[in-house]
Amino acid sequence: MSPVPAATDSSSRQITVTEHLLLHQKKSPEASGVFTQLLYDLILAAKLIARSVNKAGLLDVLGGTGETNVQGEHVQKLDEFANRILIHRMERSGALCAMASEENADLISIPRQFAKGDYILIFDPLDGSSNIDVNINVGTIFSILRRISPREEEVTLGDVLQPGYQQVGAGYVLYGPSTMLVYTTGHGVHGFTLDPSVGEFLLSHAKITIPANGNIYSVNEGNLFYWNEATARAIASFKSRENPGKKPYSLRYVGSLVADFHRTLFYGGIFMYPLDYKNREKPRGKLRLLCEASPMAFLAEQAGGAASDGEQRILDIVPQELHQRVPLYVGAKEDVDFVTALLREG
Ligand code: P6P
């Protein structure tokens, strides 16, 4: 019998996420099959969300539900749908002992009837949802921690309020012209593109690194009135020659963190959401530390970049509350270090 001819098309060289993870498991012996199962279930949830996001214009999922979430934001139907899909899928994964969602005020426990694991999943089910109705990219952002309390005890908030350097995994799914998964487990950043014909995320961008000298800055300039002097000056430097690029940068701003971060990851430059004084008594950042800034910071550092809150490294911040917000400066190291130094000078 003649040997089976090796596949000749490019698909024979395509690597799925599961294969890629198994390759990593060889590198990090502590990574167990449970982690692979966690990501597998997360990917299944993402495919289900992608299917609805891609048909949003055709299904009655556009528009809001008329409700507001813990953040006081209008809940879009797709937000709610994505949140339900993730919770339903992930509580059955057998990998988790708790979850936290941007859409839920409190920790989400794993129902008694399901097997539990030692991981905690924190997610923003559909970031950028304000852009859903105008067909602009939205995304799911996730962060994975390992519990620190003994397995036989109840999970507490202390298991979740860990600094970002404790993350064992982080990433996002970007729903756009193509659906992409970008993730890290601490061994670099890797991008997978969903091939709808086979329903698999296939490795399309291995070992992503943020290019230096990317001359793009990304910020909502409409908030200028709400920034303090030091912030306004620091951001203005990107419109002058007084910056690491030695020339004015281009401004690009989508208003979806996943889209703005994804562009920064590939083109370089910097994304900024500064502290703003919209509430004069309580100036704060807008982005959430646990489900937005921290996972993006882990990805940025793993891609050779940096992330700060304007004072300190995002990954060093010890969270005080579940929905804590922080300012975020993330992107190419030289740009983040430059603007952080200016802000520290005041
Ligand atoms: P603004 C989306 O609502 C989001 O949380 C992030 O995805 C995005 O970066 C930011 O808010 C945009 O905020 O105030 O510029 O519209």
Image (spheres, helix red, strand yellow):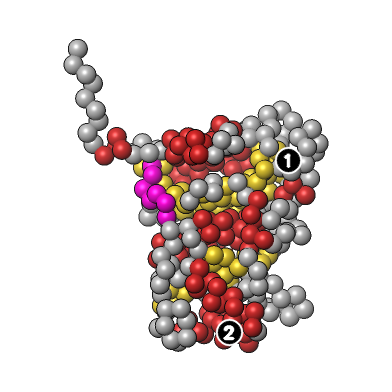
Identify residue for label 2: 232
Q: Which percent across, then down, holds residue 3?
A: 22, 19
Residue drawn at the location 60% of the way across and 53% of the way down = 124
Q: Is 81 placed left or right of 280 in the picture? A: left
Q: Quadrant of residue 307?
A: bottom right
Give the residue at the far left of this rendering: 2
**Quarter residue 71 falls in:** bottom right
Question: Is residue 258 visible in this depiction of the protein?
Answer: no
Amino acid of disc 1:
Ser
User: At x 68% / y 37%, what residue is drawn?
Assistant: 118
Q: Determine the CA span between mark 2 and mark 1.
A: 42 Å
Residue at (44, 62) in percent of width and height: 210
The secondary element bearing badge 2 is classed as helix
Please state, as top left, top right, bottom left or bottom right, where the C terminus lies in the image.
bottom right
Q: For this view, does 315 lie left or right of residue 213?
A: right
Residue bearing mark 1: 109
Picture quarter containing residue 17? top left
Residue closer to the observer: 247 or 108:
247
Q: At x 24% / y 28%, what residue is drawn? A: 6
Q: Does 206 appear in magenta?
A: yes
> Percent position (x, y) of residue 313?
63, 65
Magenta segment: does it hold 82?
no
Q: Tag 2: residue type?
A: Ala
Callout 1 secondary element: strand
Judge left or right: residue 201 versus residue 95: left
Furthest residue toward right: 153
User: Relative to 20, is 285 above or below?
Assistant: below
- Start-end of magenta stretch: 202-208
